[in-house]
Image: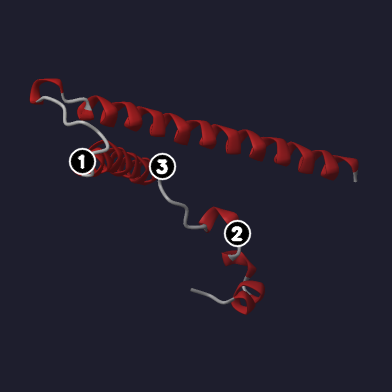
Amino acid sequence: MPSLLDQELYPQTNDLESANRPHTLSVLIVLMFAAVTISYVFAYGASGALVAANILAPWPPYDDPRPRWMVTSFVLLLGSFTLVTLFFRMLSRLSMRRIDAIVDEA
């Protein structure tokens, strides 16, 4: 990886097009893995610990709410990830418009 001095000496390698950006699919896979992990810990780990500590009453096997809790928390986490992404994309567009307006004024 070239240092900052090398990038100043060789400007042809100093463009934004050659920046190593993560692929969209890999980012989505990481976010989905995080959502599955967090929802599993919430649904099974936390509820199991609360049942073991006699804070929650054990439920009968035919009426186990944990899979529903896991799916619900997974959907909510993915929805919140999507909303945060859309918010930052909107914020980025607004910032770019302001920068373009400043450049156009000059």
Distance from the alpha carbon under mark 3 to that under mark 2: 21 Å
> Which of pointers 1 and 2 lies earlier in the amino acid sequence?
2
Distance from the alpha carbon under mark 1 to that under mark 2: 52 Å
> Which of pointers 3 and 2 lies earlier in the amino acid sequence?
2
Residue at 37 percent of width and 40 percent of height: 28
Q: Which residue is mark 2?
A: 15
Distance from the alpha carbon under mark 3 to that under mark 1: 35 Å
- How busy is the neighbourhood of tag 3: few (under 14 within 10 Å), some, or many (20 plus)? few
Mark 3 and mark 1 residues within 8 Å of each other at the beta carbon: no
Task: Tell me residue 39's x, y (percent).
Answer: 30, 37
The quarter of the picture where residue 62 lies is: top left
Residue 90 placement, left or right of 81: right
Nearer to us: label 3 or label 2: 3
Q: Which kind of residue does numbered mark 3 sit on?
A: Thr
- How busy is the neighbourhood of tag 2: few (under 14 within 10 Å), some, or many (20 plus)? few
Q: Which kind of residue does numbered mark 2 sit on?
A: Asp
Say above or below: 4 vs 95: below
Residue at 22 percent of width and 30 percent of height: 66
> Which of pointers 3 and 1 lies earlier in the amino acid sequence?
3
Q: Which residue is mark 3?
A: 24
Q: What colour scheme does the image use?
A: secondary structure
Mark 3 and mark 2 residues within 8 Å of each other at the beta carbon: no
Q: Which residue is mark 1?
A: 48
Q: Which kind of residue does numbered mark 1 sit on?
A: Gly
Say above or below: 3 vs 84: below
Task: Tell me residue 1's x, y (percent).
Answer: 48, 73
Nearer to us: label 1 or label 2: 1
Say above or below: 106 vs 93: below
The quarter of the picture where residue 7 lies is: bottom right
Helix, strand or loop status at disc 1: helix
